Amino acid sequence: MVDSRSADDGAAVRRRRACLDCGNRFTTFERSELRVVYVRKRSGQRVLFERRKITTGVVAATKGRPVQREEVERIAEEIEALASRAEPLMTTEEIGRAVLERLRQHDHVAYLRFASVYKGFDGAEDFARELRLLEAREGPGSG
């Protein structure tokens, strides 16, 4: 091997090589093969995990809140890692609960926003009930 360095912003390794027989030089790119991750929907349907959906939901929930984009990405990474380790499959319900748990730790307003969509709130009483549950778990005035 002649030279080895990172390529594609760290997604690959570029190697310059030389043939020991003829001396010709060539380049190879090595990339890790990603495991395909599926989740089970409430309907029972098995679908491809899409990290983008997690990110989109968390970005919407945290809009205007003091939650940095890096934190949103970290939440999405954690959920993706959970889904990839789940046997046999993680359900969309489990994914929603995992997102809620992480948002609860960071921002209660974002938590309530996400919960309103995830749990399908129909009115103000749904928000009030969820807020009571949140306060009972965290204690009044926290977060």
Image (cartoon, rainbow, N blue to C red):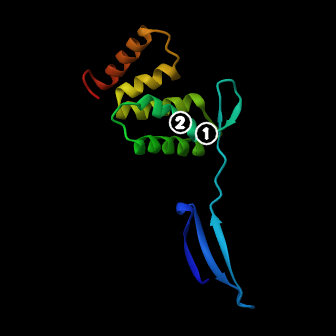
- Out of 105 and 54, give the one closest to the viewer: 54
> Label for residue 54?
2
Circle 1 packing at 10 Å, graded few (<14), some (14-19), many (20+), is: few
Question: What kind of residue is marked 2?
Answer: Ile
- Out of 10 and 42, give the one closest to the viewer: 10
Query: Which residue occupies the extreme right position in the image?
Result: 22
Between the C-alphas of marks 2 and 1, the distance is 7 Å
Image location of residue 65, percent across then percent down: 35, 31
Image location of residue 63, percent across then percent down: 41, 31
The answer to whether marks 2 and 1 mark residues whose Cβ atoms lie closer than 8 Å is: yes
- Out of 38 and 110, give the one closest to the viewer: 110
Q: Measuring 56% from the left and 76% from the top, which residue is drawn there? A: 4
Residue 113 as seen in the image, left or right of residue 2: left
Image location of residue 143, percent across then percent down: 29, 29
Q: Secondary structure at mark 2?
A: helix
Q: Measuring 47% from the left and 19% from the top, which residue is drawn there? A: 116
Image location of residue 104, percent across then percent down: 38, 30
Q: Secondary structure at mark 1?
A: loop
Q: List the residue tagged with mark 1.
A: 50
> Label for residue 90?
none
Question: What kind of residue is marked 1?
Answer: Glu
82 versus 110 height, above or below? below
Residue 115 as seen in the image, left or right of residue 84: left
Residue 56 as seen in the image, left or right of residue 140: right
Query: Which residue occupies the extreme front position in the image?
Result: 64
Kindly indicate the quadrant of the structure image that contains residue 30.
bottom right
Q: Measuring 36% from the left and 17% from the top, which residue is drawn there? A: 131
Q: Locate the N terminus and report the quarter of the image it occupies.
A: bottom right
The count of marks equals 2
Residue 64 as seen in the image, left or right of residue 57: left
